[in-house]
């Protein structure tokens, strides 16, 4: 996993990173694991106005990256805006558990082994006073897939195969926007309901005030359940909240999404009241059922695992498959 520290305005951050890559003879467009087609270009053009309206700072960063790479920003929009929409992936697992001893948000990131050396942990600190600093992880760039901000709001996503798409923001960009713009779950939920969403997904959110919830959404429906009824929640790559079951889609290759969900649900429902940090690590590592035991020969694997300890204000990350590698505390970011 590549580690990056970004400081400055959004444009400055993008430009410095783009220039650094170019200096090291790395062209972003040469490392895209899918082909950019006409449909993606047209879709990104239709999505662009929504990013400009709701998250203009991220457009500034993309423009900076493009300037540093000596390419047009329009060449990056189809890559970034099509993720989770036209580029449909069904992977990753998330959970939250809260009891008298523990308050954890955990996530496995499952993706392609062919580009695992490009995956990033990013520490962002902005000059703009209305953008909060955060630590985030991504299989791509700019968009984030799990992270925590300076106020202790932690968020993690899983993708869901959509029954329809329309112009709007994708779940990876939305997650990053929540980290930059919201101090708490209470602030994040209204923004989630307001922003135009292009596709489907799930989010788990928790903050240091003790609030937490799971969110399931399509581009025209959003439902969230808090942890007030029980002390845990979990998500993989399909819908499980009662209000969203009619939107559930079965796909041929969902990376064992339902099996992963049942592993989380069965273990958490029995053990959440006494679960500890070490048991959370074991859960993500597959000790209590299938969660990360992919056959790497297929090109799939769990490529990192994160745990955000909201009670003790600590971050733990396993950079690789947690069934084979150890979690280590990351103390570089303070929240």
Image (cartoon, rainbow, N blue to C red):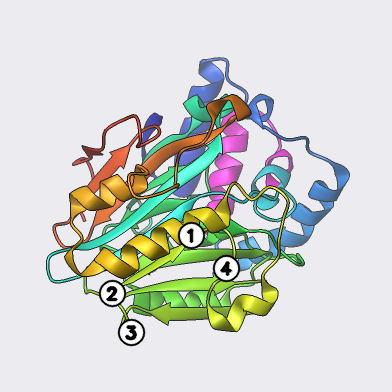
Q: Residue at x 38, y 56 (%)?
A: 128
Of residue 73 and residue 98, the one placed in the foreground of this image is: 98
Residue 31 visible, this orientation: yes
User: Mark 3 or mark 4, which is nearer the start of the sequence?
Assistant: 4
**Label 1 to label 3: alpha-carbon separation:** 19 Å
User: Mark 1 or mark 2, which is nearer the start of the sequence?
Assistant: 2
Task: For label 3, count other residues whose C-alpha is less than 10 Å away and answer few (under 14), some (14-19) or many (20+).
Answer: few
SS for callout 2: loop
Instruction: Please provide percent x and percent y for residue 206.
Output: 32, 68
Find out whether the residues at labels 4 and 3 contact each other: C-beta distance under 8 Å: no
Figure check: 173 above or below 135: below
Taking the image as shown, residue 144 lies to the left or right of residue 231, namely: right
Which numbered disc, 1 or 4, marks the residue closer to the eye? 1
Q: Which residue is denoted by mark 1 in the rendering?
A: 261
**Label 1 to label 4: alpha-carbon separation:** 32 Å
Any magenta on residue 110?
no
Figure check: 103 above or below 73: below
Task: For label 2, count other residues whose C-alpha is less than 10 Å away and answer few (under 14), some (14-19) or many (20+).
Answer: some
User: Mark 4 or mark 2, which is nearer the start of the sequence?
Assistant: 4
Which numbered disc, 2 or 4, marks the residue closer to the eye? 2
SS for callout 3: loop
SS for callout 4: helix
Q: Which residue is denoted by mark 3 in the rendering?
A: 229
User: Mark 4 or mark 1, which is nearer the start of the sequence?
Assistant: 4
Quarter of the picture holding the C terminus = bottom left
Q: Which residue is denoted by mark 4 in the rendering?
A: 54
Magenta extent: 57-77
Which numbered disc, 4 or 3, marks the residue closer to the eye? 3
């Amino acid at each position: 996993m590549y580690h990056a520290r970004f400081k400055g305005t959004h444009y400055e951050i993008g430009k410095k990173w783009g220039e650094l890559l170019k200096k090291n003879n790395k062209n972003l467009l040469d490392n895209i694991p899918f082909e950019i087609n006409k449909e993606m270009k047209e879709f990104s053009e239709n999505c662009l106005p929504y990013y400009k309206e709701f998250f203009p700072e991220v457009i500034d960063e993309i423009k900076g990256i493009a300037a540093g790479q000596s390419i047009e920003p329009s060449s990056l929009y189809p890559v970034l805006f099509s993720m989770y929409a036209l580029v449909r992936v069904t992977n990753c697992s998330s959970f939250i558990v809260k009891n008298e001893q523990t308050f954890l948000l955990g996530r496995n990131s499952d993706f392609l082994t062919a580009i695992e050396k490009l995956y990033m942990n990013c520490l962002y600190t902005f000059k703009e006073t209305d953008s909060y600093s955060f630590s985030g992880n991504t299989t791509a760039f700019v968009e984030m897939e799990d992270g925590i901000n300076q106020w202790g709001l932690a968020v993690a996503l899983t993708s869901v195969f959509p029954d329809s798409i329309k112009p709007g923001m994708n779940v990876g960009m939305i997650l990053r926007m929540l980290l930059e713009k919201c101090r708490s779950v209470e602030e994040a939920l209204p923004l989630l309901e307001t922003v135009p969403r292009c596709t489907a997904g799930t989010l788990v959110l928790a903050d240091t005030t003790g609030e937490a919830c799971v969110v399931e959404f399509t581009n025209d429906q959003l439902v969230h359940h808090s942890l007030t009824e029980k002390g845990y929640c979990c998500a993989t790559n399909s819908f499980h909240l009662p209000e969203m079951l009619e939107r559930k889609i079965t796909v041929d290759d969902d990376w064992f999404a339902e099996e992963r969900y049942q592993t989380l649900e069965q273990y958490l429902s029995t053990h959440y009241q006494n679960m500890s940090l070490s048991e959370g690590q074991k859960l993500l590592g597959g000790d209590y059922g299938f969660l990360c035991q992919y056959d790497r020969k297929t090109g799939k694997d769990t490529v990192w695992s994160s745990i955000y300890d909201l009670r003790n204000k600590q971050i733990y990350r396993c950079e690789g498959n947690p069934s084979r590698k150890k979690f280590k505390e990351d103390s570089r970011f303070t929240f």
